[in-house]
Structure formats: C-alpha cells, structure tokens
Image (cartoon, grey):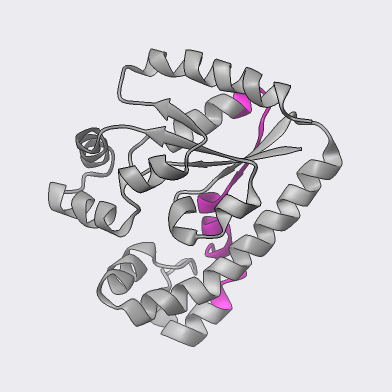
C-alpha cells in the first residue's frame, strides 16, 4: 500500500486538504488526533504525565491542560523533552497499530499520515513512500491563525519559530499543494494527486 506523509506549517490548511483526500477514499491517520486521544481523560499518557509534572498538568475533567503544558514547554526545554518522551512513543505505537489495521482491511487505495512535525521528527521521511507538503506564504499562515485562534501576531510567530521553515518542508516534498489561493483552487490539485496516488498504489 502506498503510504504518504502529509505536512505543512500551522495555518497552511493541512486538515482541509487531508479531509478532501479522505472524501475521495484515502485512509487517514492524524497524529494530532492521536495526541488528543492519549491526553484525554483516562488516556494512556495521563498517568505518566501526572507522575512527571504533578496533578497540576490536568484540567478539572482529567484531560491534560494543553494551554498550561504549551506554556511550560515553550519556556523549559527539559519539560519539552519530558513531555515528548511520554507522548511520542505512545503516538508512534498507536500510529503503527492503526496503520496495520488499514493495511489488513484492504478498503482504501492508499494511506495518508497527517503529521504536523514530519520534518522536525527526523524519522518520517524513511517511513513513508512520499511526502506531501501543503504550502502557503508565511503571511497567509499568520493571518489564518490569528483569525482562527485569536492569537496575536507575536504568538503565531513564536509557534512558527518552533516549526521547520517553509524552505525545509519544501526541500523534503515529493508533492506540493499550493494553498495560497481561494478554497476552490484546492480541489483540482487534490484530484490530480489522488489519481497519481491510485496509479502508484501498487
């Protein structure tokens, strides 16, 4: 089965593009959704997180307090390493088990992993057959995230500074979808790549 890693910077439109591929029959495994799953109340990461950071890392409902943890890891590299040491192996294990189920099911022409930090992780390029980057100008990213999340420009820039550069993402891309234009410009690009992926699904 052809397996593709889809990535892009914050605000690039990864989720919209991934959903368009799913509507055409692709299997999706979104590592961000898996991260939410393991940090939800009773999730696999909750016990280790409390052991590492104390009960203050949780919201009243028992889920990880994402805002508090985001603030902590932005200011403390050791905390960031601890958090990633807990969550990344769990996400990888879940990713692999979900992918095995997709392969065994035989219901999808190809599999797309949605991985926001594909370039930063260093291991994904060897794990997928192709890398698809959803690309747009940095000013477009900033405007979208400010409008969507209510963040200040400085907050968006701080997040972007922690991500791979646009040039670094494009350097590893086998395929690129340009999402700088109007929403209707996406469908023809997705359709072209869907046809290509089906042809090379093997």
Residue 138 vertical placement versus 196 (above, below): below
Q: Is residue 54 visible?
A: no
What residue sits 33% from the left and 77% below the top?
77
Residue 49 part of the magenta-drawn span: no
| Percent position of residue 159, x then y | 27, 55
Number of disc labels: 0
Which residues lie in the magenta part? 22-47
Residue 40 vertical placement versus 104 (above, below): below
What residue sits 57% from the left and 79% below the top?
47
Residue 28 part of the magenta-drawn span: yes
Residue 59 vertical placement versus 26 (above, below): below
Q: Is residue 108 left or right of residue 56?
A: right
Farthest front residue?
171
| Percent position of residue 81, x then y | 42, 77
Q: Is residue 99 left or right of residue 185?
A: right
Foreground residue among 98 and 196: 196
Foreground residue among 26 and 39: 26
What residue sits 21% from the left and 57% below the top?
158
Q: Based on the displayed image, in which of its 4 quarters is residue 124 positioned?
A: bottom right
């Amino acid at each position: 089965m052809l397996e593709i890693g889809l990535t892009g910077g914050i605000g690039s439109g990864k989720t919209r593009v991934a959903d368009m591929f799913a509507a055409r029959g692709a299997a999706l495994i979104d590592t961000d959704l898996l991260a939410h799953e393991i940090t939800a109340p009773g999730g696999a990461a909750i016990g280790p997180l409390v052991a590492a950071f104390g009960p203050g890392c949780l919201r009243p409902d028992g889920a990880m307090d994402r805002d508090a943890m985001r603030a902590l890891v932005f200011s403390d590299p050791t905390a960031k390493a601890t958090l990633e040491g807990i969550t990344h192996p769990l996400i990888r294990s879940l990713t692999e088990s979900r992918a095995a189920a997709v392969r065994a099911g035989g219901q999808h022409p190809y599999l797309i992993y949605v991985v926001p930090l594909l370039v930063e992780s260093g291991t994904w390029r060897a794990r997928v057959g192709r890398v698809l980057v959803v690309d747009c100008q940095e000013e477009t990213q900033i405007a979208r995230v400010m409008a969507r999340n209510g963040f200040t420009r400085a907050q968006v820039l701080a997040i972007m500074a922690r991500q791979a550069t646009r040039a670094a993402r494009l350097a590893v891309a086998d395929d690129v979808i340009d999402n700088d234009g109007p929403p209707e410009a996406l469908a023809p690009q997705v359709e072209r790549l869907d046809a290509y992926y089906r042809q090379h699904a093997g």
